[in-house]
Amino acid sequence: MKFLDQAKIYIRSGNGGAGSVSFRREKFIPNGGPDGGDGGKGGDVWVEAAEGLNTLIDFRYQQHFKAQTGHHGQGRNMHGAKGEDVVLRVPVGTQVLDEDKETVLVDLDEAGMKVKLLSGGNGGWGNTRFKGPVNQAPRHANPGQDGQERWIWLRLKLIADIGLAGLPNAGKSTFLSAVSAARPKVADYPFTTLTPNLGMVDLSPSERFVIADIPGLIEGASEGAGLGTRFLGHVERSASLIHLIDGTQDDVVEAYRIIRGELEAYGEGLADKTEILALNKIDALTPEAREEKAAALEAVAGRRPMLVSGVSGEGVTELLRAAWAEVKKTRGEVSDEGEDVVPETPGGWQP
């Protein structure tokens, strides 16, 4: 399925149904009086975060969504039915923005979250509502209230526990395919991933987390170069980052500085996230080259990088364990002293 993380759509709530002008006409009942019913309320427009979705591709082929108009009132005091609502089902992590593409209206960051975007118009009153001692036979009714309309943007920010960051060809896609069932494009020639990929890492039945591979960043991405900042939003919700550096390139220190500079320039707290530094593709390095480049990274980053290889699997388990430790901290499963937190059972222990 093709990945789409932005879409502009038009939404409109339903108009209210018109009230009815009617009089009771039955044998042996003279002067039956007015019996026109009210119109029904117009349909609302809702947005709902649904599990199992990871793209906005459905909104590429349909951009206009209109709720149903309320049914008109009828004689014998029969009120019109409410118009059917429109429910926009979007992936978890979707933001609803105003037409200016800056004002966030709704942030659907939890599965099952449902928010009303537009309310339908109220139905008009039938002539029964207007009868009284002075006007006993009203011959007018109210029309239904008009619905609301607007253009909105849908922007998807993937929800992952760990985000992969790095320059193009740093081996992020290979690493993701090695640690999860995700199958991003991997080849033996230089290229960059064009769409984000999600993968589920299973360390054990009770140790699972989601990892996101975003397209490679280049220098100036925060100012619009390359793919720009469009995909950096997918790691905003990540608990921490794994910064992969291609060990086969000549200047690993410059590669580290470029990514750190882009994260800081983008803002939104990306530079403040916990970063796990890893020197990748060590299967292609000699022991001397490994030590030299690891020492150079340690000097600039202030911490020893982990040595990994997505191809051979060397160091992958250790890196995933370090990532899982950060995930547990974010989920509140680890105390400040580093001990696992055991959730309390409501009502005490029961067999």
Image: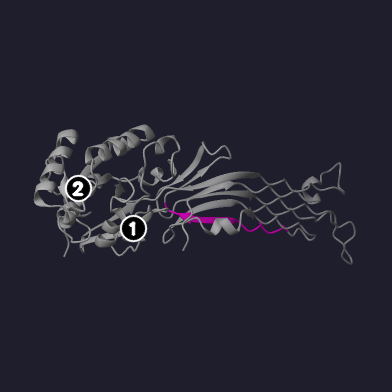
User: Where does the image place residue 45, in percent across and percent down from the top left?
Assistant: 59, 51
Is residue 218 shown to the viewer in this render?
A: yes
Q: Residue drawn 24% across and 60% down?
A: 179
Secondary structure, mark 2, is strand
Q: Amino acid at mark 2?
A: Leu
> Which is nearer the eye, 19 or 29?
19
Percent x, y for residue 43? 64, 54
On whether residue 306 falls in the magenta region, the answer is no
Q: CA distance from mark 1 to mark 2?
A: 20 Å
Q: Is residue 226 left or right of residue 297?
A: right
Q: Looking at the picture, does residue 81 appear above or below residue 102? A: below
Percent x, y of residue 163: 31, 48
Horizontal arrangement in the rendering, residue 7 relative to residue 186 (left or right): right
- Magenta stretch: residue 82 in it? yes
Q: Would you say the residues marked 1 and 2 are in contact, meaning their CB atoms lie under 8 Å apart? A: no
Kindly identify which numbered label has been placed on residue 189.
1
Disc number lying in front (1 or 2): 1
Determine which of the numbered discs, if any, sits on residue 279 in the image.
2
Question: Could you tell which of marks 1 and 2 lies nearer the N-terminus?
Answer: 1
Determine which quarter of the picture holds residue 224: top left
Q: Local crowd at mark 2 within 10 Å, few (<14), some, or many (≥20)?
A: many
Q: Secondary structure at mark 1?
A: loop
For this rendering, which residue is in front, 172 or 12?
172
Bounds of the magenta span? 79-92
Q: Where is residue 276 drawn, in percent x and y?
A: 21, 44
